[in-house]
Amino acid sequence: MSGPKLKSGGAAAHEADVGSQPATLGEIGLDRFAPYLMNRVMGRWNADIQKALREFGLTTAQMRALAVLSVIPGLTIMELSVYTVTEQSTMSRTLDGLESQGFVRRVARADDARAREIFLTDAGAAAFARVWPLMRDAYEKMLAGIGEEEREAFLGTLRRIVRNVRRHNL
């Protein structure tokens, strides 16, 4: 069973677009609309990861928190929410669960006792170490057939896009 075709536009359509902005999504085409393509990629990534995480007893939000804290320890809930692209209220509940599993600990910030910094425990680091191969395999599958030079160009473009849309200096 085949689904609807994406409007490609082709080279001629692209050349026609150079001097003017397409007025509609139909004129742009879904396969030339970056937000649509990014949503497709991340939707598939999240679905695949979520399914695999069940065997580890982790949610996607928990995996994101463990991943970020494995690289940047000592973040506040707000900072961790930004890095994990998770609502702060969801991150608070996520951390409650991770703390009850013994995977994270919260420590009062030295210069502001009201702020809590979050760190992985040894058990949390071990949990992430078990999940990392799954994440790495999914990452490699997603980028299969894309050479190193093209990957670096793609990642550079994504970093510029993040700078364009970010609301926090993180």
Image (tube, rainbow, N blue to C red):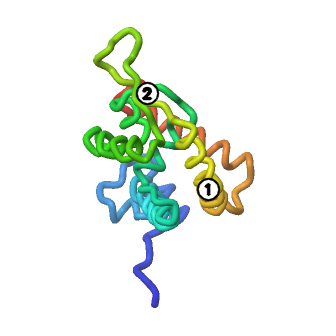
Identify which residue is drawn at 40% across, 59% down.
36
Q: Is the residue under label 1 in contact with that under label 2 (CB below 8 Å)?
A: no
Q: Where is residue 88 in the image (x, y as percent from the top left)?
A: 29, 38
Asked if residue 163 is positioned above or below residue 59 in the image, the reply reads above
Identify which residue is drawn at 46% across, 86% down.
2
Q: Which residue lies furthest to the bottom in this view?
A: 1
Identify which residue is drawn at 40% across, 41% down.
99
**Mark 2 closeness class: few <14, some 14–19, many ≥20 residues within 10 Å:** some
Quadrant into which the C terminus falls: top left
**Mark 1 closeness class: few <14, some 14–19, many ≥20 residues within 10 Å:** few
Q: Tag 1 or tag 2, which sits nearer the N-term?
A: 2
Give the spatial CA distance, label 2 vs label 1. 25 Å
Closest to the observer: 81 or 63? 63
Image mark for residue 75: 2
Q: Position of residue 32 (x, y in %)?
A: 46, 59
Image mark for residue 139: 1
Closest to the observer: 20 or 157? 157
Q: Where is residue 91 in the image (x, y as percent from the top left)?
A: 33, 42
Asked which secondary structure carries label 1, the reply is: helix
- Amino acid on which disc 1 is placed: Tyr
Q: Which residue lies furthest to the top in this view?
A: 111
Closest to the observer: 40 or 107? 107
Q: Position of residue 22 (x, y in %)?
A: 35, 54
Asked which secondary structure carries label 2, the reply is: loop
